[in-house]
Image: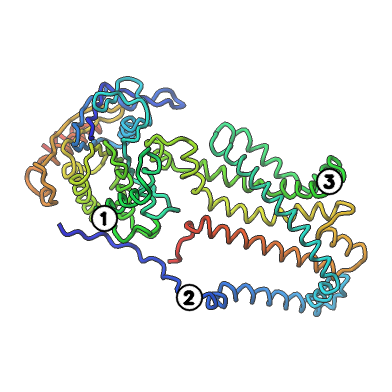
Amino acid sequence: MAYVPDPAPTPAAPSGTSFVQRLTSRAVLAPIAAIIVFLLFWEGLVWFNEWPNYIMASPSDLPPAYSRYWELFLVMGWQTLWRTVVGLLLAVVVGVIIGMIMGFSRTMRDALYPLLVGFNAIPKATLVPIVALLFVGQHDFNTVLIAFLISFFPIAVSISIGLSTLEPEYRDILRALGASQTTIFWKIALPKTLPEFFGALKVAVTLAFIGTNLMEIVSPHGRGLGALFDSGKTNSDYPLMFAVLIALAILGIALYYVVVALEKIFAGWAERAPS
Amino acid sequence: MTQTIEISGVTHAYDTASGKLPVLDNLDFIVPSASFCAVVGPSGCGKSTLTKLVAGLLIPDQGKVLLDGRAVKGPRSTVGMAFQNPVLLEWRTILDNVILPLEIVPNKLTRSQKEDRARELLSLVGLEGFETKRPSELSGGMRQRASLCRAIAHKPDILIMDEPFGALDAFTREDLWQTMHRLRAEEPFTCMLITHDLRESIYLADQTIVLSDRPARVQHTMDTSMNGRTDLDVLYEQEAVEMLHVLRDQIKIAQGRAEDAQAAQ
């Protein structure tokens, strides 16, 4: 019998555009335009209100600050970046483990959720002196610890929700074949949870930066951009303080897009073609 | 090797907050090796529980599920399953989805042999050319075709289907019925199909079993083999229409609407 399969929905148009074309495309130009508009607005606001730069620095104050302290910015920026990344990696490992425990065991989920939510509700700034006293002088460790403490929560929650909402049919398909729990985790539960995980990781990235800087600003003899901010404050170098904030924002954006790139590689399948 | 499924005195209940909920009550029937059995009945009567018992995902409180005379004690790699939801893995291509059981079930196939097996099945259901597509790029009917391929990729002795065509539109469903006949001609398996569609059971099954309302018992058994015909016209002929009437009446009785059934006589 002649057989005609039912028609498929039209797949997304193949992207035959070159790299250069994509660079100049909307995805790149639009955010750059938005940043330029933002800077113009900021500059205009300061100019219009005639604010002196000890009240509010303007974008035009930033290049002099960067050119004067560029070496410091490189060194301190690196300090901040590696501590944030290490804290974040720790948050991923611990968050995934806690998420798995809560995702696979209903009892553990019921038991741990209030504890976790309660911990997350504590302002992490209050933990800074506690941690600083607990591990006196261990500045790197303390900074990493605060970055970790502030950023593991969204990861744990996303993994636990991803695992606990796995449709039973997915499990049954493999279970009926005699697959072990480990196989089910690697073949189905883990990949299916990746989109949620990356969503949480994007939140965790910015949180980790906040954690790192909390410690760097508060801690005496600190290093990193937070310490640079603090020294700007001490010396009433207001353009420097603003320059630090912008540098932090740039690092945050950079790390965020690293996560986006990883997401595209490992969970790109979850992105649907626009209809 | 296809196997005979024997449901022997199976009684099963679920533990709920308000005590035991009996779902199956002393169920007895046989699905002969290589034949196709449809199970119909009021919704919520325990049909899906039955599929889990045959798959070995559940063990009955009383009675036995026997495959070629041996009691089912747990999941076995000789079973394939398909559900109403095709549950394809969105992160895998269609080809890799069909290969999945071959990655689980112990076998000596090389990667390229597994791919060949998957390609062979996909072409059998009319999905050649879609091997590298993702499930999200396929229509509902095509996804269900791929799901069927996956269910039989490891050449199971028994195929269990729980309303696999329930969510499809009428035309796509008829297409898939024909696909099912084609698969059966090429691939040996004993099939148990849970369905709400009485025409489906008449067209596809050799034997249709009507279950009563919960707790389910076998209320009626009917030979629906239609002399092996596989054209859709068979559904519009006198024999099929009469079967349809009998099955509908049986369902009404199962639902506790016997007077409706009598009024229709």
Q: Amino acid at mark 3?
A: Gln
Quadrant of the rendered image containing residue B27: top left
In the picture, measured across the screen, residue B87 lies left or right of residue A7, that is: right
Q: Which residue is mark 2?
A: A17
Q: Which residue is mark 3?
A: A138
Mark 3 or mark 2: which comes first in sequence? 2
- Rendered location of residue A209, percent (x, y): 73, 56
Q: How is the image coloured?
A: rainbow
- Residue behind mark 1: B123
In the visual, does B129 lie left or right of B226? Answer: right
Quick one: label 1, few (<14), some, or many (20+) residues within 10 Å? some
Question: Label 1 is found on which chain of the structure?
Answer: B
Check contact, mark 1 vs mark 3: CB within 8 A. Answer: no
Helix, strand or loop status at disc 2: loop
Task: Name the chain under label 2.
Answer: A
Q: Residue A268 placed where, x, y %?
A: 50, 59
Give a yes or no on whether discs 1 and 2 share a subunit. Answer: no
Vertical position of residue B257 compared to residue A275: above or below: above
Q: Is residue A88 above or below residue A67?
A: above
